Image (cartoon, rainbow, N blue to C red):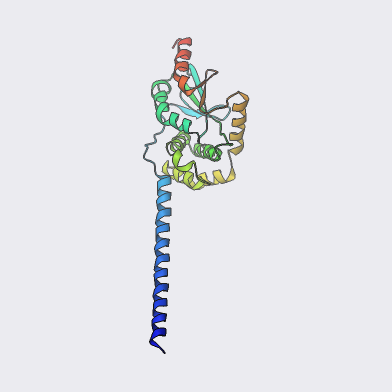
Amino acid sequence: MSVQSTRGRRVKTAKQNNLLYLYIAVGVVAVIAITGLVVLLTRNNTEVKAPTAPVGRTEEGFYYKGDPNAAVKVIAFEDYQCPGCAYFSRNLAPILERDYINTGRVQFIYHELPLTNIHPNAVAAAEAARCAGDQGKYWEMHDQLFANQSLWAQLSSPLNVFSGYAGRIGIDRAAFDACMQAGTHREAILAAAQEAAALGVQATPSFSVNGQIVDSGRLFTAIDAALRAAGR
């Protein structure tokens, strides 16, 4: 056996080992990246609290918070994947809750309006909120979805992320997952979208204040006017 052929085999073996180490390293990096992505998608730095006002469902099946006998009824027509709706939820809804809902002057009703032509995950998100509502945590999931919208909105399938949120708000994940997989609330959500369209609501977020349709920029003005009209 020649020295040259022995060296050739050694060089070849060394290259194979280097490639093996490279593949292992790439695999480790991929696992770390995937793990990091899952953690990022389920992480929530916003504290989500249960509403302090009365909560429940209307006769039509829509979730509300606030006194059902309040002088002013505000119906929110929103899409969970709508950036403007997320802005409202994070920045304006706390004011509405503090000054109007918690004081008993406004009943706030959430009416889904998923814009499926531009927001493919909107229906699934609305289903997630209602599936959480089956376990008494509708508003907690509602707030989770909007607080983390930028993390799940562009996913091809956000179901695993939503399941993670279910765990964070303390509900039975197996029951939640079964609800999502069965599409338990899908028909009701699609019907809600059709109903909103029939009322002439075409953009989100939009609001009905005692029957008057307004956008978020005119919401508080319309509420104050309705309260004055009611002597409140």
Q: Position of residue 197 (x, y in %)?
A: 61, 27
As drawn, 109 above or below 41: above
Number of numbered callouts drawn: 0
Q: Residue at 42% of width from left, 50% of height from top?
A: 37
Q: In this view of the protein, which residue sits in the foreground, 8 or 195?
A: 8
Q: Position of residue 138 (x, y in %)?
A: 48, 35
Q: Quadrant of residue 213?
A: top right
Q: Position of residue 96 (x, y in %)?
A: 42, 23
Q: In this view of the protein, which residue sits in the foreground, 177 or 214?
A: 214
Q: In this view of the protein, which residue sits in the foreground, 20 or 225?
A: 20
For residue 100, side relative to residue 156 (left or right): left
Please say whether residue 129 is visible from this viewpoint: yes
For residue 90, side relative to residue 204 (left or right): left
For residue 81, side relative to residue 45 (left or right): right
Please say whether residue 172 is visible from this viewpoint: no
As drawn, 61 above or below 121: above
Q: Residue at 59% of width from left, 45% of height from top?
A: 182
Q: Which of the image's four quarters has the C terminus?
A: top left
Q: In this view of the protein, which residue sits in the foreground, 212 or 62?
A: 212
The residue furthest bottom is 1
Q: Position of residue 193 (x, y in %)?
A: 59, 31
Q: Which of the image's four quarters has the N terminus?
A: bottom left
As drawn, 23 above or below 194: below
Q: Quadrant of residue 112?
A: top right
